[in-house]
Amino acid sequence: MPSEIELKLELAPEALEKLLTSDLLGAPDETLNQRSTYFDTADWTLFREGFTLRVRQTGDSYIQTVKASGPSKSHFARSEWESAVPENTPVLDHSNPLKTEFGDNIRVQPIFDVEIERHVWNVQEDDSKIEFVVDRGAAIAGERRAPIHEAELELKDGSQSDLFALARKIEALVPVKLGVRSKAERGYRLVERQQTVFKAERLHLDKNARASAAF
């Protein structure tokens, strides 16, 4: 089963800026603008059963990712399935477990978006190869936004202990805390709040009314 092993670190905006301009990492190997659309059924069946489905656009390319993200998952290792797709529309086939889990008639729709500017470094830490990324942007649901300022350390090859060694170097430079919420969890929480917020109706008040009557 394919999986990713990563550490997620949350940073304050000023700590993120300091990290980006520090000598610890130098200039990033690449900087990307990405937009990810998360899909689910109308009643969030995927999320409730421990899966997330997204299509991420980077330039003209689209990558679909399914992750096992239920309550029993590890904070540091998650099963995932990635595949290229032609456009910002999920392809539900046997390259991932969704059809097996939920049947051929599963129907999904866009739920929320995540827009980020991503800085990428390919780091050699002892004998391990680590992809280190710094993300800043926002999760977006309707008119609501939740800011994202975080770093991710993904082990590409080598020892998990080297992830923590690199994280300690970063912590010595700027304040960080271990991130336990994924971007998907942030987005779903944002949508949940969006569904419980309603704009007040327009009020028509007599300008000569007493304050007690206006209230």
Image: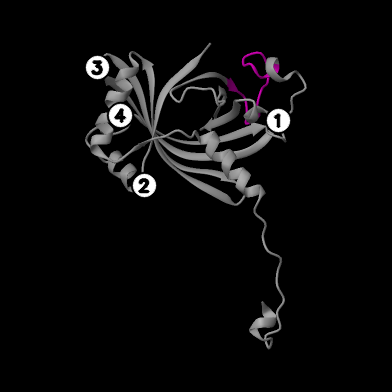
Between disc 1 and disc 3, whose residue precedes? 1
Between disc 4 and disc 3, whose residue precedes? 3
Instruction: Locate residue 42 relative to residue 31 in the image: left or right.
Output: right
**Quarter of image, res 47:** top right
Q: Position of residue 15 (x, y in %)?
A: 31, 44
Between disc 4 and disc 1, whose residue precedes? 1
- Mark in front: 4 vs 2: 4
To which residue does mark 4 refer? 167
Residue displayed at 34% across by 42% down: 16
Q: Position of residue 128 (x, y in %)?
A: 30, 16
- Mark in front: 4 vs 3: 4
Residue displayed at 33% across by 22% down: 163
Between disc 2 and disc 1, whose residue precedes? 2
Q: Residues within 10 Å of mark 2 (few under 14, many from 20)?
A: some
To which residue does mark 3 refer? 126
To which residue does mark 2 refer? 13
Magenta-highlighted residues:
84-99
Amino acid at dot 4: Ala
